[in-house]
């Protein structure tokens, strides 16, 4: 198991369960009429739907964590209940019209906290084991700034979905289709917007990678169905676009044969090369 993943788990356990899960929903900005506990629930407290995140100096000292707002929380999506966990990063540039970008990792089953800590996040774990001790610096085990973080120009919302992925938890059934995951996503987003009303009507972009090639279209379809069912356009989700990176969309055409054809077309392997596997094709790439 990668060291960075173990560090991620440690950090986010502190963040999610100390900052969010142990707080009552009554401390949140608005009520949540879906917080109905089942008779056999083992959690004695309702998790917070919105909790501000403030990293201690010992963790965030060399990063830009103090220059923008962060929130985490759990949004209920069923009457069972079932909670989806999120981590929100406000835009660094303070633009009141900056879009809302929603990110999901793939898998299926990968936590979006991977994206929130090692990929398009403003705060990365990559240098967390790097230490410095001198007159100019004194740190170890701190997150560092990612100069390519997406929240430089957008508000970025990372969501652990479907149910039970990452820090999301609940007491109901597992989701077994992208269509059902998309419906949960709409329930999540409409409830999340009640806690962050400043983003109602804001341009919204749904994004993801890998198996997100299945999730993102399903989410977008569910949003469009939701919008079509509304009589008032002012209540619609302002879906401005989607984007998918390295997406797994259709294994029928995204397979070893088409990958090798692509490498030939791009002149990345010799014309007379006949690799039988993706691994052997990659070893033949012209450097």
Image (tube, helix red, strand yellow):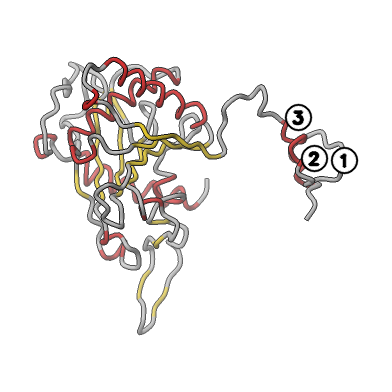
Left or right relative to 15: residue 128 = right
Q: CA distance from mark 3 to mark 2?
A: 11 Å
Determine the residue positioned at 24% across, 49% down.
96
Q: Quadrant of residue 62?
A: bottom left
Q: Which residue is mark 3?
A: 257
Do the CB atoms of the residues marked 3 and 1 lie less than 8 Å apart? Answer: no
Q: CA distance from mark 1 to mark 2?
A: 8 Å
CA neighbours of label 2 inside 10 A, class few (<14), some (14 to 19), many (20+): some
Q: Nearer the viewer, residue 278 or 142?
A: 278
Residue farthest bottom in this picture: 135
Do the CB atoms of the residues marked 1 and 2 lie less than 8 Å apart? Answer: yes
Q: Which residue is mark 1?
A: 273
Image quadrant occupied by the C terminus: bottom right
Determine whether 213 is above or below 79 in the image: below
CA neighbours of label 3 inside 10 A, class few (<14), some (14 to 19), many (20+): few
Determine the residue positioned at 66% across, 22% down.
252
Determine whether 169 is above or below 281 in the image: above
Q: Which mark is residue 254?
A: none
Q: Nearer the viewer, residue 62 or 1?
A: 62
Q: Earlier in the sequence, mark 1 or mark 2?
A: 2
Helix, strand or loop status at disc 2: helix
Q: Quadrant of residue 192?
A: top left
Q: Which residue is mark 2?
A: 264
Determine whether 101 is above or below 34 in the image: below
């Amino acid at each position: 198991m990668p060291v960075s993943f173990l560090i991620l788990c440690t950090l986010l356990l502190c963040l999610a369960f100390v900052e969010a899960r142990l707080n009552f929903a009554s401390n949140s900005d608005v009520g949540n009429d879906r917080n109905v506990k089942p008779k056999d629930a083992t959690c004695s407290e309702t998790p917070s739907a919105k909790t501000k995140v403030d990293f201690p100096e010992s963790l965030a000292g060399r990063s830009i964590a103090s220059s923008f707002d962060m929130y985490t929380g759990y949004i209920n999506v069923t009457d069972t209940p079932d909670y989806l966990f999120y981590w929100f990063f406000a835009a660094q540039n303070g633009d009141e019209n900056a879009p809302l970008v929603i990110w999901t990792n793939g898998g299926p089953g990968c936590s979006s906290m991977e994206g929130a800590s090692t990929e398009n996040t403003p705060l990365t774990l990559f240098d967390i084991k790097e230490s410095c001790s001198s007159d100019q610096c004194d740190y170890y085990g701190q997150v560092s700034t990612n100069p390519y973080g997406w929240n430089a120009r957008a508000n970025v919302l990372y969501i652990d979905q479907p149910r039970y992925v990452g820090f999301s938890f609940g007491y109901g059934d597992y989701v077994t289709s992208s269509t059902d995951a998309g419906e949960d996503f709409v329930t999540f987003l409409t409830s999340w917007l009640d806690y962050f009303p400043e983003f109602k009507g804001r341009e919204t972009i749904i994004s993801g990678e890998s198996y997100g090639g299945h999730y993102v279209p399903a989410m977008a379809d569910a949003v469009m169905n939701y919008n079509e069912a509304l009589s008032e356009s002012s209540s619609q989700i302002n879906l401005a676009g989607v984007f998918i990176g390295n997406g797994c969309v259709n294994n029928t055409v995204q397979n070893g044969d088409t990958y090798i054809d692509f490498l030939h077309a791009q002149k990345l392997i010799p014309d007379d090369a006949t690799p039988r596997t993706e691994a052997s094709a990659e070893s033949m790439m012209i450097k």
